[in-house]
Image: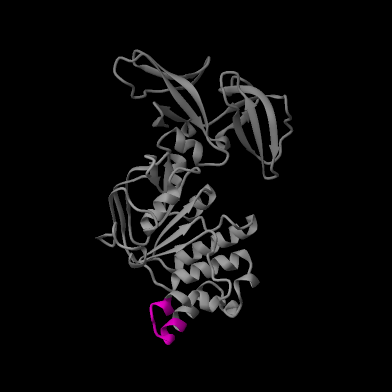
Amino acid sequence: MADVKLTHVKKIYSNQVEVLKDINLDIKQGEFIVFVGPSGCGKSTLLRMISGLEEITSGTLEIDGQVVNDIPPALRGIAMVFQSYALYPHMSVYDNMAFSLQIAKVSKEEVDLQVRKAADLLQLTDYLDRLPKALSGGQRQRVAIGRAIVRRPKVFLFDEPLSNLDAALRVATRMEIANLKESMPDSTMIYVTHDQVEAMTLADRIVLLSGGNIEQVGAPLDLYEHPANVFVAKFIGSPAMNVVPCKIEKAGEQTSVSLSSSTIVNTPIVTDAGEQSKQAFFGIRPEDLVVVDSEEQGFLSGKVSFVESLGEATLLYVQVPSCDEMVIAKQAGTLAIKRGDSVHLSTLPEKMHLFDNNELSYRR
């Protein structure tokens, strides 16, 4: 098992489109790293560059201390699991898992040992004689993972392995991948997904990408509780964090953050010297907003445009006069609030975020 290090890595296609811009990332042995971001952000391209399926335009990629830019995929010590399973339809589960070892001329005894060990780990022992067409989608994906395990690679790469599964199978297979990581604590795993639930539940650290750049790297709760900028704040969390324009106003030693005519917070905040007023963004997560009885108790007021009842929770979409986007409040249980009602919203001071020039500058 091995560390993976990317230093000033770029990817520029022949039409001069820069897909990845100066990527610097250290992945330690035994980490489960998840690349996440919107479509087109470069996460799959980055994974393919690590695997050797895409060439690196500039920069260096090291695996286990060795620069591998010019080393073929088969010699990098990696194994990749694709979203399309990529199983041989005419081969049994056993033969699919054994094939790479047989090509490498590993002894029959060792092949059998490794295949049965992986099958036992993935609960596939009863299916070894079946063809892929006789398996469910989740079972096929487990076969694909087993095929990677038997190779005993330095690094496991997963390219959106659950995207072809239905909701129930996604949850079940996600649990199996989590159990797999627990049973192989020294294995380095890099996982690509567009699903932030997968990222939050599986990752030791999340690498959030946007437009070819790394926006933030950290533990899932770090990104949730301390987003580095507005993009991270709005991407991590469902529903997304409410982010609305506000003003930082300075009068002597007092600095306040104001949204329209309502003062959100009065507290000393570090601002540029001599600047009396500047534009910023105020953020609050939907689950941190509570409905209160009067305007005096809250700091946001507006009319409910839509009510989404989920059973265990209710989402209120509130049109606040001073906000371009609707503010979402997530309340526990069911509420006797309907479309068109006026509501007042409040929150705890420690749940407030302030983004100065798009970067997180303050959280109480």
What is the quadrant of residue 353 in the picture? Answer: top left
Above or below 231: residue 202: below
Above or below 209: residue 147: below
Q: How many marks?
A: 0
Return the residue nearer the eye: 126 or 89.
89
Observer able to see residue 143 = yes
Where, quadrant-wise, is the N terminus in this rendering? Answer: bottom left
- Residue 122 pos. (x, y %): 53, 71
In this picture, residue 337 sits left or right of residue 36 = right
Residue stretch in magenta = 101-112
Q: Residue at x 49, y 34 (%)?
A: 351
Q: Main secondary structure of the magenta part?
A: helix
* Residue most extreme to the front: 14
Residue 188 forms part of the magenta stretch: no
Where, quadrant-wise, is the C terminus in this rendering? Answer: top left
Return the residue nearer the eye: 241 or 6.
6
Above or below 28: residue 317: above
* Residue most extreme to the bottom: 109
Observer able to see residue 118 = no
- Residue 31 pos. (x, y %): 38, 58
Residue 110 forms part of the magenta stretch: yes
Q: Residue at x 51, y 53 (%)?
A: 201
Q: Residue at x 58, y 23 (%)?
A: 300
Above or below 251: residue 190: below
Return the residue nearer the eye: 251 or 317.
317
- Judging from the image, the colouring scheme is one colour
- Residue 105 pos. (x, y %): 38, 81
- Residue 144 pos. (x, y %): 51, 67
